[in-house]
Image (cartoon, rainbow, N blue to C red):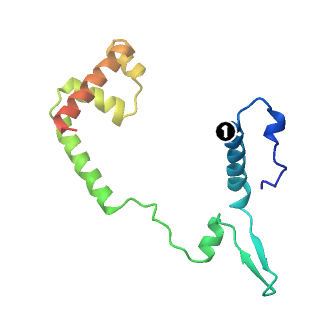
Amino acid sequence: MAIHKRRINYRAKYPDVSESIIEVLEKSDRKMEYQQYDLKVERYQIDYTRLSATWIPSREDSYERLTDENRQFASEEESVEDAAIKAVLIEKMLSSLKLLTPEEQELITELFFNGKSEEAYAKQIGISQKGVNKRKHKILDKIKKIMKI
């Protein structure tokens, strides 16, 4: 945790710098102090007239404290809407793959479904890796046009 430190005297450190730059430096120091210390520290505020003390919690909560208080968090699971959109896109993509030539289908199948590298597939069919890469990009552009993405 950050601790309070003495403020830098920019006027003494940089005597030739304008007053507006000194103000910016001091403001940035204060902002850093606020983010590193003020938000993270719990305090007591003492009222001497009423003879009472008020505890002020830190404004930065921990996950453990929030779960102890039974706070609700957004689910990390895929939402129904996202699953439906994903299913429609997969169906659309599979139907567009059927419109490709057999050679194009083989390239897409080997690279994306069988996990073969471009280099390995290039050796298999006897062309350069760069040639496979160019074909792949042309085929992907063709699929995008078919899917109208």
Viewport quadrant of the C terminus: top left
Percent x, y for residue 37?
74, 57
Q: Quadrant of residue 98?
A: top left
Closer to the camera in the image, 11 or 108: 11
Q: Which sits in the foreground, 69 or 116?
A: 69
Residue 118, above or below 128: below
Q: Position of residue 58 (x, y in %)?
A: 69, 67
- Please say if 112 is above or below 32: above
Q: Quadrant of residue 69?
A: bottom right
> Which residue is depicted at the point 42% across and 19% down?
119
* Whole-percent x, y for residue 61 in the image: 64, 66
Residue at image position (65%, 71%) is 65
Tell me residue 50's x, y (percent).
Answer: 78, 87
Instruction: From the viewer's perspective, tell me whether residue 95 is left or right of residue 31.
Output: left
For residue 24, which quarter of the picture?
Answer: top right
In the shown orientation, is residue 41 left or right of residue 101?
Answer: right
Q: Residue at horizontal 26%, vertical 46%?
A: 90
- Residue at 82% across / 42% down in the picture? 9
View extreme (left): residue: 99
In this rendering, would 115 be left or right of 37?
left
Q: Closer to the camera, 117 or 142?
A: 142
- Image quadrant where one finds the N terminus: bottom right
Residue that label 1 marks: 20
- SS for dot 1: helix
Residue sitting at the far top: 127
Q: Is residue 66 above or below residue 119?
A: below
Q: Amino acid at mark 1?
A: Ser
